[in-house]
Image (cartoon, helix red, strand yellow):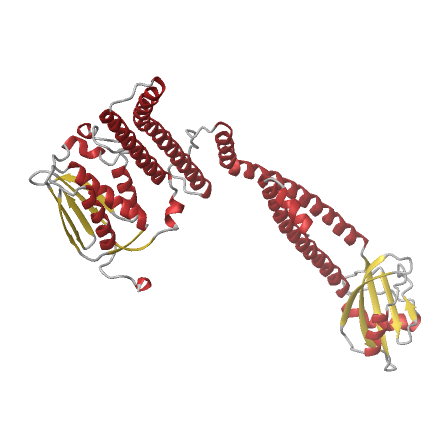
Amino acid sequence: MNRFTRRFRGLPIRARLSMLVAAAVAFAVAAVSVTCWFIVQGRLYDQLEADLQKVHGPAQMAAQRILFDCSQTVANSNGLRISYAQVVKTDGSICLDPDSTGVVKVAQSDKEVIQAGTLGTLYFRNGTDKDGNPLRVMTQVFATESGSHVGLLTAVPLKSTQDTLKDLALILLLVSGIGVLGAGAAGLAVARAGLRPVDELTEAVEHVARTEDLSIRIPVEDESDDEIARLSRSFNSMTSSLANSRELQQQLIADAGHELRTPLTSLRTNIELITRSEETGRPIPPADRKALLASVKAQMTELAALIGDLQELSRSEGQRGERVQVVALQDTVEAALRRARLRGPELTITADVQPWFVRAEPSALERAIVNILDNAVKFSPEGGKVDVALDRGVLTVRDHGPGIPEDELPHVFDRFWRSPSARALPGSGLGLSIVARTVQQAGGEVTLARANGGGTVATVRLPGAPTAPPEMG
């Protein structure tokens, strides 16, 4: 059974569907054919029994005459002649009608019926004569004048009836076979038509695997909503998402290469100057050497920051989901404020932070808030002021710098985008992109706008609660 199941499952789907349809039709046709055969058999036997019962009226008198001299012909008032007629006594002896076609073989059941002595009851059975010809036999029990019981056995041949039943069985078998074959062919045709979209989907998947062409789409009717249509739409959505992901990946690689080229070129130039000075024996003035080393250090710091940002952007969703936990947002903001005050000691940073608890990745959330504060510190004038507030999940960071032009606001969260006025300042152009991604993953939103009176205000909204959930207690 297991071997058959494995072989069946190894067949193509259309072959399995055809076999299942053929099997279902075969079962239905077999059930109908068998039922029809038994019904016809019953009707034919009923007709034979009705013919036998037509002699029921004069049967007792015929039995008496047969017993008297065994020379009387058994007949009814309608003139019906019975092919076989004989009287059977309780001891099993037979008195045969002289005009009987042959002798009916007496069965044990006939003797039991006669000995039981149930008068007037009709008993029917299939039997044979002495030559083995099939018969339909009717047995009737009568009482003789002496009080003993005898049985009158009358019978008609069954050969024509059995031939009719055999012909019917053959016809039903042929019709059933044709029906099963037709059902299998129809099932195969229906399976091919129904699975044609699956074939198209398979060809599309194989094409994508072979060529890595994600632009392929499977046509789907708009009004169709069956399983195949849903599968096709899912495939189209998947290839579209993969194409977008590849495009973003290629764009990220191109932008990263472009951003890495500048600090690497500067590093190479500075290192070559220092190396050439060592090789030629011409020392660089101490001030210039100090400036070169400071530039090398700054470029290495910028490279390290850029690589860290790229690693942050390349992390998968699954890696982030594993580290999500309940975070006290006020503590994260305080930690980011301490770092911001170190980077801008000449600035006045005010903070009004209220308790708020969110679900997020702690390190990523702190990095995002640090990036927002770094931007505020970077664009604030010397001696300027930065206002920070956290109230019921809304974090606002407002600086008093030059602000962002209106035409640049739609691009501030794009990867590697940098304002033309800020290209001379350090940075990779990934900070706000990381902020937007982190906040979205925490279920929140972030916006950047021009502040009234000058400067820029960054607003971060995160869902949460003012008190810690039970699992933090």
Would you say residue 221 is visible in this rendering? Answer: no
Residue at coordinates 81% horizontally, 69% vertically from top-left? 139
Foreground residue among 247 and 423: 423
Indicate whether 382 appears above or below 212.
Answer: below
For this rendering, which residue is in front, 242 or 120?
242
Residue closest to the far top = 280
Q: Which of 331 and 18 is in front in this view?
A: 331
> How far across and how far down the image is residue 329, in percent?
24, 53
Q: Is residue 289 left or right of residue 75?
A: left
Q: How many marks?
A: 0
Q: In this view, does 356 lie above or below 96?
A: above
- Is residue 137 rendered to the left or right of residue 470? right
Tell me if 96 is positioned left or right of 329 in this view. Answer: right
Front in this rendered view, residue 164 or 94:
164
Q: Residue at x 62, y 41 (%)?
A: 11
Residue furthest out toward the bottom: 147
Q: Residue 393's spot in the image, x, y percent?
A: 21, 53
Point out residue 192 in the picture as x, y percentages from the top left corner: 55, 36
Answer with the quarter of the image where residue 445 lies.
top left
User: Would residue 185 be seen by someone viewing this image from the given angle?
Assistant: yes
Q: 357 above or below 414?
A: below
Quarter of the image that includes the C terminus: bottom left
On the image, the x and y values in percent for residue 464 come to: 25, 55
The answer to whether 287 is drawn above or below residue 363 in the figure is above
